[in-house]
Image (cartoon, coloured by chain):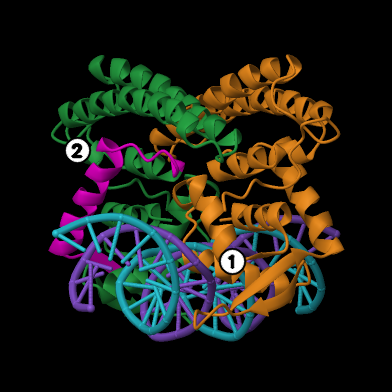
Chain colours: A orange, B green, C cyan, D purple
Amino acid sequence: MSSTRLLILGAVRIFQPVHGYLVRRELLSWHADRWAHLNPGSVYNALHTLARDGLLQAVGTETAGRRPARTTYRLTPDGETEFRLLLREALWNISPHDPSILMAGWSFAWALSREEVIEAFEHRLEQIQASARVSELAIADLANHPFTPPHVAEHWRLVQARLEGEASWVRNLIARLQDGELAFAGEPDAPSRGTLVD
Amino acid sequence: MSSTRLLILGAVRIFQPVHGYLVRRELLSWHADRWAHLNPGSVYNALHTLARDGLLQAVGTETAGRRPARTTYRLTPDGETEFRLLLREALWNISPHDPSILMAGWSFAWALSREEVIEAFEHRLEQIQASARVSELAIADLANHPFTPPHVAEHWRLVQARLEGEASWVRNLIARLQDGELAFAGEPDAPSRGTLVD
DNA sequence: GGGGCGCTAGTCAAACATGAATAGTTAGTT
DNA sequence: AACTAACTATTCATGTTTGACTAGCGCCCC
């Protein structure tokens, strides 16, 4: 699942310096375990991988009592760059076969400016329109492939129908963003760090 | 990805006895490589696993010239049972976070009766309605969890919007199935085996 | 007749995901 | 004061996915 890296980078970025358990707990409160298949192992594995690749840096290991030691991480400059890259990819491009990518991207949209998010979403609407046209043409083209079974045409229609659902969510959100809802990078109430309960 | 087993079982079931390459080629013609992440390795691995678990049986190995040997498979009775189970699960239950499951299920819907498919789809519409209610309540409940970030409410709305898209596809299909479109188990033109090009 | 291209058929190491299990800690309850 | 339920913090064996790679065969074209 390609949304894992973005989710982990983004969650570390909010709370850094932070240890794995807190990252996981935050993502659980977003229900990312369901929509992004985020098991405990995935979180810790991603942390290790990202640290090995130089996107995260382990900044210490604390032990409280006789509990398991916990390693804390923060983003490296490369990690910050990668985060912004993945975030922009997630928001600007449709991913018709992986719903978790937009969910992950939207989770950190506030890290960009309101203008960029609106622009990205408008671009998304155009892509969805283009995709409708591509589907039509692909379905028409099936006539030239007589051995392709008829359910394939419905696959195209189903993918497009789901995208239309996504489009109505996007349109609703664009309107609300233009109305000033929520807070984004550079604005007074913009979140930059998460709010820790404890 | 849980749709892999269903796809492989179903594809073997169509062409049995059949070797891996033909299964893969057929699934590629459905573009399952894109919507179900079906790489060559996944196909062969699934075949091995299903054979190990007794759902498939390797019925021979032929060698033509000095080419790689090819193993042919067919479903065991357990494999047929598992196929029908996975197929019914895919069609009767919504899977809000994995779009490939319905795509895989629909690919083999013709293996059930027209009546059952219509009933399953009607049940699906009810589940989507119920899910709308659950989303509403979940969003309302967020007021009691002040530290949950605001994007979580949009996650619920996005999942629901995509399901509404799916619902419009399902409604369209129910109407066409009631009109007698396509052919299902027990009907004159029902597909039972695939049509091989060569 | 030989050179290149695309098809056939599958393998494999590395990467990634799964989720049960572990083992100590705290808070509440009878 | 003992019990237990839930939380903290992570590991690890197992399983699945990825996609580049191999290597022979057939066909077409010059």
Query: In 3D space, how far apart are the residues under numbered discs 1 and 2 (Cα atoms)?
Result: 47 Å
Instruction: Answer whether residue B143 is magenta in the image.
Output: no
Give, as a single range, the part of the protein colored magenta.
B73-99
Assess disc 1: are there few (<14), some (14-19) or many (≥20) residues with their C-alpha within 10 Å of its C-alpha: many
Residue at 17% in and 65% down: B76
Residue A102, given in percent of the width and then of the height, sits at: 62, 39
Q: Is residue A78 above or below residue B159?
A: below
Residue, disc 1: A20
Q: Are marks 1 and 2 on the same chain?
A: no
Q: Nearer the viewer, residue B39 or D29?
A: B39
Chain assignment, label 1 = A
- The x, y position of residue A97, in whole percent, is 54, 42
Q: Nearer the viewer, residue B122 or A156?
A: B122
Q: Is residue A165 above or below residue B194?
A: above
Badge number at residue A64:
none
Q: In what element is the residue under mark 2?
A: loop
Q: Main secondary structure of the magenta part?
A: helix
Q: How many marks?
A: 2
**Residue shown at 54% from the left, 64% from the top:** A21
Which residue is drawn at the image coordinates 64% and 18% (left, top)? A171
Three-letter amino acid code at disc 1?
Gly
**Between tags 1 and 2, which lies in front?**
1
Quadrant in the picture for the N terminus of chain B: bottom left
Give the label on residue B112, or none.
Answer: 2
Looking at the rendered structure, the kind of residue marked 2 is: Leu
Chain letter of the residue beneath label 2 in the structure image: B
Q: Residue B101 lies in what quarter of the image?
A: top left
Residue A117, can we see it? yes
